[in-house]
Structures are given as C-alpha cells and as structure tokens.
Amino acid sequence: MLNNNRLVEIAGQFCLEGRPSEVKALGDGFINDTYTVLLADSPVKYILQRKNTVIFKDIPGMMSNIKAVTEHLKRKIAAAGGDPMRESLTVVPAKDGRLYYESDGEYWCITVFIDNSVSYDKADSELLAECGGRGIGRFQAMLADFDGELVDTLPGFHNIRYRFGQWDKTLAEDPAGRAADVRDLIGEIESRRSEMLDFFKLIEDGHIPLRVTHNDTKIANMLFDRSGNVLCVLDLDTVLRAPCLYDFGDSIRSYANTGAEDDPNPDRVSMSRGMYEAFLRGYLSEAGDFLTDTEREWLPFSARYITYEQVLRFLMDYIDGDRYYKVKYPEHNLVRTRAQLRLLQSIEHQLFPYNSYYVK
Ligand code: GN1
Ligand code: MG
C-alpha cells in the first residue's frame, strides 16, 4: 500500500492546475486502483489510476487509444453545443508530455474529475435504463466515423474462441485444484460451447461488423446528470474495434439484473424484462440509424453471449486461483459465477424460450 506522500508525489508528476495536496482511494474497481486527487489551491479535482499491468500489457497504447477517442468525442460534443470537459473524459499528460507516468514498472494515469454528477452500481428504474441505452447508443454513434489508429491492447477480449483456449488450458492445468468441486458449473459452460462459437463465427466471417466500442458498459462505468441522462462514459481502458453488440450485451447484463453481479443469493437474480425493453428502446433511439439488419437481429443473443462469457471468466478465474479479478473473500469468484449463471438462465428463459439448448 502506498502512503499518501508517495501518491501526492506521483500526482505531482502530471500537468495539474495546481499543487496536489491529498490523494484519496476511490471505489472498488476489479482491475485498476483508483484515487481522487485534491489540489491545495484550487477546487479542480482529478482521478489518478494505477493501471493493472498484468491485464493491460500495453499501457502507452491504451492511453493513446483513450486520447484519440476522447479528442474525437470532444469535437463531436462541441459541435453539438455540449460541454466537452464534462461530457467526455480528459486525459491529463505527465510533465514530460507522455500520457502516463512510469515508476518501478508501474503505470499511473490522470483524468479530470467530473463534479456534480451521479453514479450508480445498479439501475433503479426503467427510465434510467432507457437513458443508459441512449447514452451508449450516442457514444457509439459519435464514434461511428472515427478513422484514427486504435491499438488492439486486449487481444481476444470478448472473443469466445480465444476464451475457450484459455479455458481449456486452465481446466487441464487445474492450478488451484478446484475443478473437481465445480463440475456442475463446468458442465453449464460446455453445454453451450457450440452455440456460442456459432454466433462468434458471424463476427469472424464479417457478417457482423467491427466498430469503435466501449466493451465494458456496466452502469458503474457511466456518469449521469441530475436529470438521469448519461453525462459521460467512463473507463475507456477497453475501447477497441469490436462489434457494437458487445456493448449492448454487457449493458443488459448490468442494467437488467434484478440482483447484484456478485449476489450471494441467486434467487434475487433474474433479467428484468421491463429493464431490457427500456434499455433497448433507448439504445435504438440513437443507434437505430447505423445498425445493420444482422446486428439488430442478434441484439438479444448478445445479452446471452456476454453474460455467458462473464460466467466463463469468473469460473475460470476461480479455477485458476483468483489471479485476474480482485476478490473480497475466498469464494467471491464462485459466488459471482453462480449469480451470473442465474442471470444467464433467466435471459435464456425469457428471450430464447424455444432455443435448442433450452428444450434439451
Ligand atoms: C472488469 O474494469 P471494470 O471493473 O469495469 C472487466 C470487465 C468485466 C467486469 C465485471 C479489463 O471491469 O470485462 O465485465 O470487470 N474488465 C477487464 O464487473 O477485464
Ligand atoms: Mg474496465
């Protein structure tokens, strides 16, 4: 754990509007460590992050992606009469001009803190889900004509073929000796393998296009304004060229879950049909113009696909001895797996009642 003096010193490496005086831990992200930075002589605040170098192998590439995408967004926002400093993240460079500060192999980055906004861990109304859908649809629409370079900083991120490669290896090695106890859950993954690969083939064969997308659209990664509209999309670490269906699917996984992602009581978990429809309505109001018929047709399946992938990732990390996601207690990844599996079953039950898997 770094002490405050060291964190203040790190913040001082960046081009801030004043002298940093205090750095406070913020939130409980699964991947990076996040802090707020206060200045001695100004009300401006910043977000400081220590990026996870085990997961992100190319932080300079990631930050240049974020810079390019936010500059594009800012131009669009300004042209539409919005406020680019509040409606987009702003990357603050280090004093040497780089978009990060590196020390002892650790990478630190700063963005401007957006005040006077609201954030949620869970959508609490259909109206909020509809606004969330509009927000992500607009985000994708603004990036539809982005033609800059994007480094593929997370090869295979939502690629189920790649995930099965990791999965097969983890199961074969069984590093923590946990596989035998979760045979039932492994069976849930295996029984859906071929359907997931069939869907992924549409992407590999180019029937579903790659666009510029967020890839981690849970509600906590969005800031809302006081009237409930999405103000700013956060956490751009995973911005990549990928199908826009991944954003839709991941949003449903988050917005439409009646329970928590890691709910210890799976009976609280299900897909709210009302939240699903509300998010879809909002999303289509912004994305409807650019979606192809094939994309539209596969929107419901994307909720299933991304939730399935999340079950696989949580279970795989459990079997692997909890090396990817931060865990708060020893069985956390298993609890997450069971809760997400319940959500997957509810999605299947409601959106795919005649699916071949389901009638088996
Ligand atoms: C991670 O960065 P964060 O906490 O928003 C993960 C997502 C998962 C999510 C589950 C780079 O997201 O893919 O869906 O946890 N991000 C990465 O909550 O693996
Ligand atoms: Mg993230």
Image (cartoon, rainbow, N blue to C red):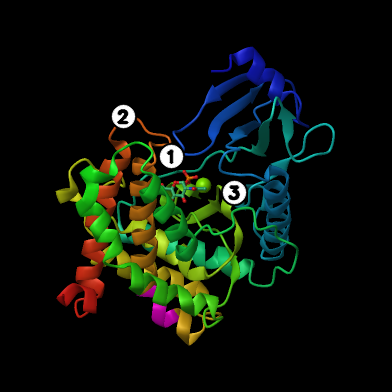
Q: How many discs mark residues in the rendered view? A: 3
Quickly name the residue at label 2: 329
251 vs 314, nearest the viewer: 314
Q: Answer with left or right where residue 184 lies relative to residue 139.
A: left
> Which label was assigned to residue 237?
3
Residue located farthest toward the right when viewing the structure as drawn: 96
Mark 1 and 3 residues: CB-CB less than 8 Å, in contact?
A: no
Residue 299: say if magenta.
yes
Residue 7 position (above or below residue 160): above
Q: Quadrant of residue 52?
A: top right
Residue 114 position (above or below residue 287): above
Residue 322: say if magenta.
no
Residue located farthest toward the front when viewing the structure as drawn: 172
User: Is disc 3 placed on a helix, strand or loop?
Assistant: helix
Q: Position of residue 346 (x, y in %)?
A: 21, 63
15 vs 329, nearest the viewer: 329
Q: Is residue 40 visible?
A: no
Ligand 2 within 8 Å, label 3 CB: yes
Q: Which residues are magenta?
A: 296-300
> Which label was assigned to residue 325?
1
* Mark 2 nearby-residue class (10 Å; few <14, some 14–19, many ≥20): few
